[in-house]
Amino acid sequence: MKILVTGAAGFIGSHLVTRLVEAGHEVCGIDNIDNGRICNLHHIPAWTKKYFSQVDLLEYEKMIPHVEGKDIIFHLAAKGSVPLSFVWPDEFFDNNVVGTQNLLLLMRHFKVPKIVFASSSSVYGDQPTSHKFEESLGVVKSPYAASKRMCEILIETTRFCASYEYINLRLFNVFGPRQRSIGEYAPVIAKWLQHKKMNYPVDIRGDTIRDYTYVDNVIDAFIACLNAGHASWNETYNIGCGVGTSLKKLLEHCDIKMYTENPRRDGDILTSIAGISKAGVLLDYKPKIDVKTGVDMLWKLEYSA
Ligand SMILES: NC(=O)c1ccc[n+]([C@@H]2O[C@H](COP(=O)([O-])OP(=O)(O)OC[C@H]3O[C@@H](n4cnc5c(N)ncnc54)[C@H](O)[C@@H]3O)[C@@H](O)[C@H]2O)c1
C-alpha cells in the first residue's frame, strides 16, 4: 500500500514507520522536527534518506507530493503536551487543528480514500467514570484536548464532502523507547526511568490512576486498521490496555524507592482507563504487552546500559 505517516520522526510515528516498512509497504513520512528527531529513524537509514521529508502540515504546497496518490494516511503530527497547551493555546490550535484541516483539504483534492488519526484520551475531559467508553465524553479541560476533539470532528464531518473513510484512535498514556525523558513536562514513565538511572528521586503528584500502554500495542492497533473491513471504518476507538495503574503501583513496576509526594495537580482527573471492547470486536485489537512487562523492556532497551 502507498502510505503517508505524518509525525514520522516522533516517538510513536517512528515505531509506526518501522513496522510499516518492515511489512513491505511503500511508506513516506513527514515531520517538521518540532518535537521529533531524525535520530528516531536512524535504524532505517536507507528509508530515511529516500522517503523522509522535513515538511510542516501548515506548508500546503509542500504537502502536495506527499499526499497525492496515497492509499491511506496515518496522521500523528501534532503538538502533544497538555501543560504546554495552556502556555501557547493559539499555537496548539494553528498547528493541530489548522494543520489537520490542510491535510483534509488535500485528501479531498487528491481523493485519498482513508485516514487514521491519532486522537487522545484527553478528549474525555471531566467524564467521571473510571473506564472511558467512546460514546460518552465529558467537558474537555485543556487547549490540547480541545484541539484533538476538534480534529476528530473535522475528520468526521469533512468526509461528507471528501468521501474518505476514517478511524480515530484515542490513545491512552503511551510509553516506550524513543520517548523524550528530559524536561519538566516529559511523560511519567520515561522521566522516572531517567531519574532512576541518574539516582535522582522522582516526584509523585497525588495517586492518579492511568492506563499506561506500551507503544507496540498501539502500533498493533494502527496496523489493524490496514486490515480492517468496511464495518470498522468511520468509527472511533479507545486504544489502551484496559487496566488502571496507580502512581504508587507504577513506582513498584519501575522498582523506584526514592520519591517525594505532592498533592494532585488542579484539574487532574483521578482515574482514566480505556474501555477497549469496541476495538476488540471491530479491530480485533488485543494488547499483548502489559505495563510491567513494558516497563521492564523499556528499562533494558533504553536506560540500563
Ligand atoms: N504519547 C502519548 O501518550 C499520546 C497519547 C495520546 C495521543 N497521542 C498523539 O499521538 C501522536 C504522536 O504522539 P507522540 O507521543 O509520538 O508525540 P511526538 O511529539 O513524539 O510526535 C509528534 C510529531 O509530530 C511532529 N509535528 C508536530 N507538529 C507538526 C506539524 N505542524 N507538521 C509536521 N510535523 C509536526 C513533531 O515534530 C513530532 O515529531 C500525537 O498526535 C499525539 O497527540 C500521544
Image: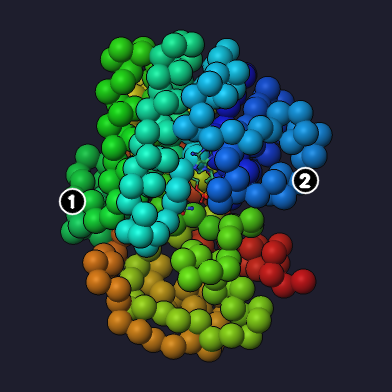
Residue that mark 1 sits on: 139
**Residue drawn where x is 42% and y is 56% of the image:** 81
Quarter of the image where the N terminus is located: top right
As drawn, 178 above or below 146: below
In the image, residue 61 lies at what x, y percent? Answer: 53, 21
Residue at the far right: name it: 46
**In this orientation, does residue 283 appear?**
no
Q: For this rendering, which residue is in front, 144 or 190?
A: 144
In the image, residue 227 lies at what x, y percent? Answer: 52, 24
Q: For this rendering, which residue is in front, 172 or 13?
A: 13
As drawn, 117 above or below 113: below
Q: How many marks?
A: 2
**In this orientation, does residue 91 appear?**
yes
In this picture, residue 228 sits left or right of residue 180: left
Q: For this rendering, which residue is in front, 191 or 137?
A: 191
Q: Would you call the spot at circle 1 few (<14 residues within 10 Å), some (14-19), or many (20 or more)? A: few
For label 1, being within 8 Å of ligand 1 is answered no
Q: CA distance from mark 1 to mark 2?
A: 41 Å
Q: Amino acid at mark 2?
A: His
**Residue drawn where x is 51% and y is 45% of the image:** 218
Q: Within the image, what quadrant is residue 108 found in?
A: top left
Residue that mark 2 sits on: 43
Ranked by sequence position, the earlier of labels 1 and 2 is 2
In the image, residue 305 lies at what x, y percent? Answer: 77, 71
In the image, residue 214 lies at what x, y percent? Answer: 54, 55
Q: Would you call the spot at circle 2 few (<14 residues within 10 Å), some (14-19), or many (20 or more)? A: few
Q: Secondary structure at mark 2?
A: loop
Q: Which mark is residue 111?
A: none
**Residue drawn where x is 28% and y is 67% of the image:** 268
In this picture, residue 181 sits left or right of residue 263: right
Q: Amino acid at mark 1?
A: Val
Q: Secondary structure at mark 1?
A: loop
